[in-house]
Image (tube, rainbow, N blue to C red):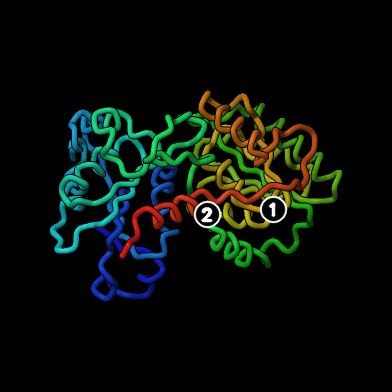
């Protein structure tokens, strides 16, 4: 089933909303879908969200020049082929699995295609099929008219969302003294279970800084952290005034509120999404636990260090001058410049 999104679509039924000329292919992996959705949300127009579900051999679709729906499950195929008198003018996709679906929509509907991340085999077999490729600079994309390098990854944390999160959490965090250190903890790449010793050591180092400055710690863990590492982190932080959100516990996830309320942010090196989202704030951003990072993560971190966006975590944190990073907004502006949505 498809959904309409965007500021003009709020508080209306689908029949009341202007026809969505933008379709977003929503991959089930959150970090992947957030790139396409984050860009679409910055265009300022209603868009249709096409949830993608995968069956067997989804990557075989990339072997078909011009795109294919191979690998999609039945429900996703129905969503992608929905009969419409107003086909999309623009399709936004992210990840290798959705690249072939986007090319199929271009061949069927004549839509322009904006794709985030490497399109894989689909890009090799249909190199001119993508109207704009949004590729991380740390992947060293070859220069081309249809390639737009970005720092980190586009995401959904717009300046407006951060302002809303700060306001929503202001009273709830009023008892936590400044300077506030927000600590974002991930886990091993494509796995679950950070080593508890790493989590405990990180917690102790951050707690010492908070104690020395008279501040507090706002910590969150992720689905990849694991329960043992989460408890080890909590033990390490125990000598400081802290709030810790354990992944999956009841109640609202304070992730956005913690980010928006931070004076400094420490984020583990294993997550492209968390590092990129931290850079969307005004806080000083520090990257910790580099041993948790893969090769691509190290390239990302090096690119952000070179750009003055992040520093490596040592024995202290603090504010430093840097522009807030808003790559989703920059990409959206480039889309509207190249492909005006009438």
The percent position of residue 188, horizontal first and vertical second, equals: 53, 29
Q: Is residue 213 above or below residue 124?
A: below
The percent position of residue 32, horizontal first and vertical second, equals: 40, 42
Q: Residues within 10 Å of mark 2 (few under 14, many from 20)?
A: many
Q: Residue at x 38, y 71 (%)?
A: 8
- Residue at disc 2, secondary structure: loop
Task: Report how far apart the C-alphas of labels 1 and 2 lie in the structure.
Answer: 15 Å
Q: Residue at x 49, y 31 (%)?
A: 192
Image quadrant assignment for residue 93: top left
Q: Residue at x 59, y 50 (%)?
A: 280
Image quadrant assignment for residue 269: top right
Residue 98 appears anywhere in the view: no
Q: 87 or 83, which lies in front?
A: 87
Q: Residue at x 73, y 47 (%)?
A: 321
Q: 128 or 302, which lies in front?
A: 128
Q: Are marks 1 and 2 in contact (CB under 8 Å)?
A: no
Quarter of the image for the C terminus: give it: bottom left
The percent position of residue 77, horizontal first and vertical second, equals: 17, 47
Q: Name the residue that disc number 1 marks.
A: 262
| Disc number for residue 157 | 2
| Disc number for residue 178 | none
């Amino acid at each position: 089933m498809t959904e309409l999104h965007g500021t003009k679509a709020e508080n209306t039924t689908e029949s009341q909303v202007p026809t969505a000329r933008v379709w977003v292919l929503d991959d089930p992996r959150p970090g992947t879908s957030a790139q396409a959705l984050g860009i679409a949300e910055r265009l300022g127009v209603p868009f249709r969200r096409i949830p993608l579900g995968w069956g067997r051999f989804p990557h075989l679709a990339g072997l078909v020049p011009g795109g294919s729906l191979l690998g999609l499950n039945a429900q996703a195929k129905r969503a992608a082929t929905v009969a419409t008198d107003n086909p999309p003018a623009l399709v936004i996709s992210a990840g290798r699995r959705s690249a072939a679906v986007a090319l199929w929509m271009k061949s069927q509907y004549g839509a322009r295609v904006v794709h985030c991340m490497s399109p894989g085999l689909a890009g090799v077999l249909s190199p001119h099929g993508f109207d704009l490729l949004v590729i991380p600079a740390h992947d060293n994309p070859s220069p081309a008219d249809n390639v737009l390098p970005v720092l980190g990854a586009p995401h959904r944390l717009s300046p407006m969302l951060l302002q809303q999160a700060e306001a929503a959490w202001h009273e709830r965090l009023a008892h936590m003294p400044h300077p506030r250190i927000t600590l974002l903890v991930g886990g091993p790449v494509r796995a679950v279970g950070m080593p508890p010793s790493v989590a405990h050591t990180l917690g102790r180092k951050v707690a010492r800084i908070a104690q020395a400055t008279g501040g507090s710690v706002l910590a969150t863990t992720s689905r990849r952290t694991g329960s043992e590492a989460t408890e080890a982190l909590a033990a390490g932080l125990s000598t400081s005034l802290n709030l810790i959100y354990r992944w999956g516990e009841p109640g609202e996830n304070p992730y956005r509120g913690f980010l928006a309320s931070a004076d400094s942010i420490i984020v583990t090196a294993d997550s492209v999404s968390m590092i990129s989202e931290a850079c969307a704030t005004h806080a000083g951003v520090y990257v910790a636990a580099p041993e948790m990072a893969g090769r691509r993560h190290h390239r990302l971190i090096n690119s952000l260090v070179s750009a003055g966006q992040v520093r490596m975590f040592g024995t202290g944190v603090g504010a430093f001058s840097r522009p807030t990073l808003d790559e989703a907004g920059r990409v959206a502006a480039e889309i509207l410049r190249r492909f005006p949505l009438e």
